[in-house]
Amino acid sequence: MTVQAGRTREAVAELTGGRFGARQVSATRLFLEAMHELVPPGTKPTWDTILRADVAEPGSRAALKFAEYARTSWGRIEPEIRALLEAGAGPVLLTEAAVFARYDAMGVLDRLAAAARLGGHGLWLLCPQGDPAREPRLGTVAVPYQAGLGEWIELPDSWVTNAHRAGLTLEAR
C-alpha cells in the first residue's frame, strides 16, 4: 500500500482500527531487536562497533562483518513474521519497512509475500512516499508486486483522513 509520506500515522490508525484489524509490525523494530540480541552488552563487538560498521566503506572488513550480522538478523526475523501470518487474527501490516531495502533483504520480503499468498493471514506493506500514485518503493528500491492479484493499493489522502465517512456523517444530520 502506498500512502503520502505525511499521512503514515493516520493510515496506520485506520488500517489497525476496528474495520480492518491489521496487526502493525515495525520491520525496523524487529531488525534492531534482532541485531541487539546478536550483540549482548559487555561483549565484543560492541553496539558502537556495529553502528560504525553500518556506515563502513563498502567491501571493507567492517562492512562485510556487518552484512553477516544483518543476514543473521533477517534469518531470525523471517520465521517470526511467518508465524504471525499463520496465527492471530487479521492481516499483518509491516511498517517502517525501508530496512528491507537498506539491508539487502528484499528477498526476505518476497518470500514473506509468497507465503502470504498461500493462505493464512494477509501481509500488508505500507510504503510512505512523496507520490502515493506511483508504484511502491522502499527508499529507492521498487517493491515487487503482482498487479493481476491487486497487490498494490494506493491510499489517497481522502481515504486516510476518512473524508468519505465525514461526508456521510454530515449528510445524515
Image (cartoon, rainbow, N blue to C red):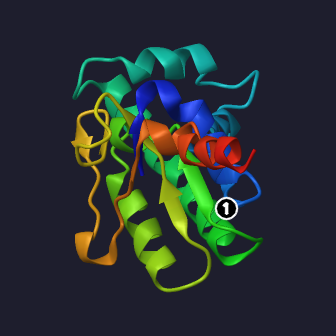
| Residue situated in front as seen by the camera: 162 or 125 | 162
Point 30% across, 47% down: residue: 136
Percent from the top left, x then y, of residue 36? 66, 33
Point 47% across, 46% down: residue: 126
Q: Is residue 108 above or below residue 120?
A: above
Percent from the top left, x then y, of residue 57? 25, 18
| Residue situated in front as seen by the camera: 10 or 89 | 10
Point 69% across, 51% down: residue: 16
Q: How many marks?
A: 1
Which residue of the protein is positioned furthest toward the bottom in this rendering?
118
Residue 42: quadrant of the picture: top right
Q: Is residue 38 above or below residue 50?
A: below
Q: Is residue 83 in view from this perspective?
A: yes
Point 58% across, 24% down: residue: 45
Kind of residue sitting beneath label 1: Phe
Percent from the top left, x then y, of residue 105? 38, 50
Numbered disc 1: secondary structure: loop
Please indicate whether residue 136 sits to the left or right of residue 69 in the image. left
Q: From the image, which quarter does the C terminus lie in?
A: top right
Percent from the top left, x then y, of residue 118? 48, 85
Residue 161: quadrant of the picture: top right
| Residue hosting label 1 | 20
Q: Is residue 31 in view from this perspective?
A: no
Please indicate whether residue 163 sits to the left or right of residue 148 in the image. right
Q: Is residue 57 above or below residue 19?
A: above
